[in-house]
Amino acid sequence: MCVITGFTAFTFIMSDINTLALIAFSRYVVVCKPEWDYLLKEKYPKYFLIGIWTYTLIWTVIPLFGLSNYTYEPFGTSCTLHWHGRQIVNIIYNSLCLVCCYVVHIVTFVFCYSQIIRNYWKMNRATDTALPLRPQALGTGQNMAVEEIIGYHKIVSTSHLTKVSLTMVVLFLIAWTPYAVITVWNIFSTPVNANIQILPTMFAKISCATNPIIHGFLSYSFRQTTRRLLLKKPNENRHLSERKYQGTTWIRSFNGPMTVNGIYIGTHCIHVSETEEETRY
């Protein structure tokens, strides 16, 4: 039973941190490498998910075949890898696991989010005056370039989505870093007293519950959907549109609360040419 518990816990923890690394990479592609955008469409996400679980199972199944093993934590109430094992196979596996399942991911997080923040800072400086996307613009005859609208939406949506994913990463690292430090100590030195390990272990294992909470608090669409379900309110029409002919092109103006990828970005008026509407939005 201890082996099953340890294997299950390690598998879901590994899938969690692998997913966070993939999210960091996807945000990096969207913000810094738009030419790689094809990697986030069509068949590629399926392969990324397969890769996540393959990488996860490689590391979690190995202890079942004798290279390290699952055993009770020193305080005896939960099961994990044999971090304090002194056999050479335990030391080799634990060291490789620490590097490939924790350090590599931290490097990925730091690289991706540092590049995202740097790129966002550059875009923000380039648009230091906010675009006049205001409800009052509707009906004034003011035309706005689609490129500016798309750029503004990219900046705003990228900012919020990045904050959400970065928050998940930060909370995950806060939860797991004390446990990782104790693990390193157990591998290369005298095992830490069992009583000292209780809080870092329990704190680390509740980290899987943080992601749904973060999404619940920060996702506008999730909050709105939950509110409608609980209050049994009908779905509201968020976007009012108006169609005008200007020059040789029909322009449609959208006015109202907007979301991008389910993230609320405020109330705006966006003008889109009829030919671009279906492909852009």
Image: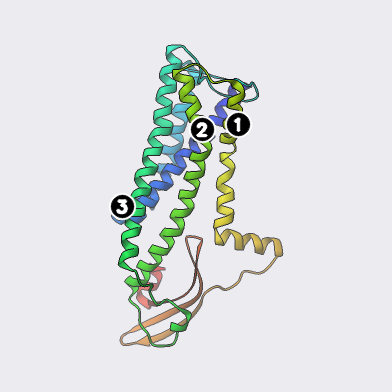
Residue for badge 3: 36
Most extreme residue toward the right is: 231
Question: Depth check: 13 or 187 in front?
Answer: 187
Q: Looking at the image, can residue 240 be seen?
A: yes
Q: Secondary structure at mark 1?
A: helix
**Mark 2–mark 3 distance (CA, rounded to whole Å):** 36 Å
Q: Residues within 10 Å of mark 3 (few under 14, many from 20)?
A: few
**Mark 1–mark 2 distance (CA, rounded to whole Å):** 9 Å
Q: Position of residue 263 (x, y in %)?
A: 50, 61
Name the quadrant of the N terminus. top right
Residue for badge 1: 199
Residue at (61, 28) in percent of width and height? 198
Question: Depth check: 118 or 256 in front?
Answer: 118
| Tag 2 near tag 3, CB within 8 Å | no
Q: Residues within 10 Å of mark 1 (few under 14, many from 20)?
A: few
Circle 3: residue type: Trp
**Mark 1–mark 3 distance (CA, rounded to whole Å):** 42 Å
Q: Earlier in the sequence, mark 1 or mark 2?
A: 2
Q: Secondary structure at mark 2?
A: helix
* Rendered image: mark on residue 178: 2
Classify 172 as above or below 158: above
Name the quadrant of the C terminus. bottom left
Most extreme residue toward the left is: 35
Q: Earlier in the sequence, mark 1 or mark 3?
A: 3
Circle 2: residue type: Pro
| Tag 1 near tag 2, CB within 8 Å | yes
Q: Earlier in the sequence, mark 2 or mark 3?
A: 3
Most extreme residue toward the top is: 87
Residue at (48, 29) in percent of width and height? 181
